[in-house]
Image: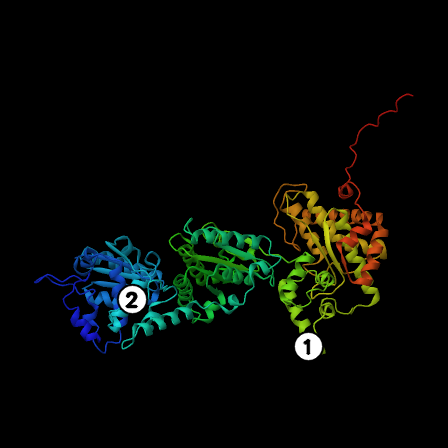
Amino acid sequence: MDIVQLAAQHAHEDFDGEPAEAGQPRPDLLDVTRRALRGDDRATERALVAHSIRGVTTVAQRRRLVAAPGLAAVVRVPTAAWVGPVARILRGSAEWGYVYEAPVQRRRSAEDTHDRTIANALAQGMRLLGISPDPERLLPPTLVSACDLRIDVAFPDADLLAAVVRSAVGRRHPLPMESYDATGLDLPDIVAAIRLNSTPVECLVRLERARASRLAPDPGVADAPRLADLHGYGEAMAWCQDLLRDLAEWRAGRTPFPNGSARAVLAGPPGTGKTQLVRSLAREAGMPLVATSMASWFTNSSGNLDGVLRQVDALWERARAVAPAVVLIDELDALPNRAGMEARDRTWWTPVVTHVLLSLDGACSGVTDGLVVVGCTNHVGMLDEALVRPGRLERVIQVRTPDDPVVREAIMRSHLGGDLAGEDLSPVALATAGAMGADLMALVRDARRRARVAGRPLGVVDLMALAAPPVRRTPDDDRTCAVHEAGHAVVATMLGLRVTAVSLVETATYAGTVTVDRGRPGAMLRAGLEREVSILLAGLAAEQVVLGVRSAGGGGSPTSDLAQATAILACVHGEQGLGRTLSYVPCHVGRLAPHVAEAVEHDLQRLFRATMTLLASRRDALERVTARLLVERVLSGDVVRGFLGEPGPAVEGCLAPKRPRRPGKRRPPTAG
């Protein structure tokens, strides 16, 4: 049966399949088959849109939509792709004074003009229609507030698709669509799959193929490791596990979608595996991943303001189309912080930031269930405060460098697979102190290449050769470096912290490293801050004690020991109210107020002398750690603790400043 025969068969049916009464005007809104004549290249599109409207409206609503005078109607559609087709159907079904199609954000000036036009048109009794995927945000506010009839068109379900297939191909026999899931299909996908002169089964095959293509996981998701195989994520992993439990409760129908716990920012240094964790989360949750970034908004558009805003809208439309889904906004700090913008940048960037914030409101509200939204950043301090407030990306979770050698060994084994299963990798784990997850992945990859070039199986020697390359320093420089790192390790251990590794292995940034587990941060009193400063000064203090002279290894860069120690003490005296004054003085190292600079230098000298005293009291242990470090290049914290034994009581007390005696009369000696 072709489309013309189908039209003739339904020529006397009303909207709901009931015969029209004789002599009564018959509304044309859903009489799609009469309009879908042979040669109409939009027949399937018309049928799909019309059936969708029919499924969410009553006969009375459709009659109002067609004929009610002075009507202000608003139609919410699933995505921007539906705006034009819905407008064509409704324009052809009734007379309208104005039809507003808003798939993307309008300019403010244009919006003001539309508001005045709408008010005047309604006052004159005109019929107005607005169509948008987000009416409250994209349509003129006057039209939304004056709305008499609101229609929300939903994504097609199985019954609706079956009806469209029957209308298009003219087959009345049952279709195998009882449990068909159309998640992820946008209007163009469905129109392209349901073709005239096809069988119902052929249409269904094309629909399923389109759905599979739309929902095909990102290659990074398909290959992502299970969460159980990831190590060193701490708080971030706990958040993932809690979220998976909340999602399981939601899918079971016992709780609403966990909008609060499903929004977060992962913050940490580059290479700590933030994006990898999000991909693994999407795989574990069984959700498609919709990934984006500020850079993609520019590269996928003209780079003009309207093009960037359209990319933001397209992100959420794509996410809603495949929901439930995980949305990843990578390099979130590329979106400028409005508080730090220069005047010349504010005009262009403020609409972008505002638009992103408003779109987040829509995506993170209870109206839009099924979206897990995660942002990733290397610089959490650069984020706009409005991004991380409650209701948006309200939780910031730190992803830190894997300081524990056991964790680094587990990360390497996850990349090694079954290789070196029975081998001891603890020396390699110790030698990679300070390495990120990405560094460890590259280490395993390069070690495989090294073994392949040598024509033999991978061995621990290949990993160790890359983790601890040959020494390039002179013997004197190497000894100075060993004394320096041993000083850090000995003082940290004496002050009650747990040293996990000491290394002479050179990195791109440091000549050696000491990894310290500081545990959970507590209330930062001045004594705790001075302890941190003493550990930072311990390298130079050890050089003074053992070698009788200091090297330049404690300074030279903004991340050096001296730079960090100076910054801590500057905050103590200028910003944290822990010095002699309570006044707040913003501290930028290099531009310190004179009284703050004087106090900082006084404390640096005092703590340096106290640290030298600590090391001189255990010089034997300091030199034994140095000698062992020169031979083995990497030591565990247990070796350092073994040389020191149990730390003495109140060792930290020697860092406290000595109180001067109060002036007064000397008491006379008592008589014997």
SS for callout 1:
helix
Residue 670 to residue 611: above or below? above
Q: Which quadrant of the view contains residue 190?
A: bottom left
Q: Upstream in the sequence, badge 2 or badge 1?
A: 2
Direction from residue 45 to residue 492 in the image, left or right? right
Direction from residue 444 to residue 180 in the image, left or right? left
Between residue 351 and residue 293, name the one nearer to us.
293
How far apart are labels 2 and 1 at the CA level?
57 Å
**Disc 2 residue crowd, few under 14, some 14–19, many 20+, Cα 10 Å:** many
Which residue is the site of mark 1? 452
Residue 26 to residue 588: above or below? below
Q: Position of residue 371 (x, y in %)?
A: 43, 57
Numbered circle sitting on residue 162:
2
Residue, far right: 672
Residue 244 visible, this orientation: yes
Numbered circle sitting on residue 549:
none
Q: Position of residue 327 (x, y in %)?
A: 46, 61
Q: Position of residue 244 (x, y in %)?
A: 50, 54
Q: Which quadrant of the view contains residue 546?
A: bottom right
Quadrant in which the C terminus is drawn? top right
Q: Which residue sits at x=84%, y=59%?
A: 627
Q: Position of residue 102 (x, y in %)?
A: 32, 63
Q: Which residue sits at x=81%, y=64%?
A: 478
Residue 437 to residue 394: above or below? below
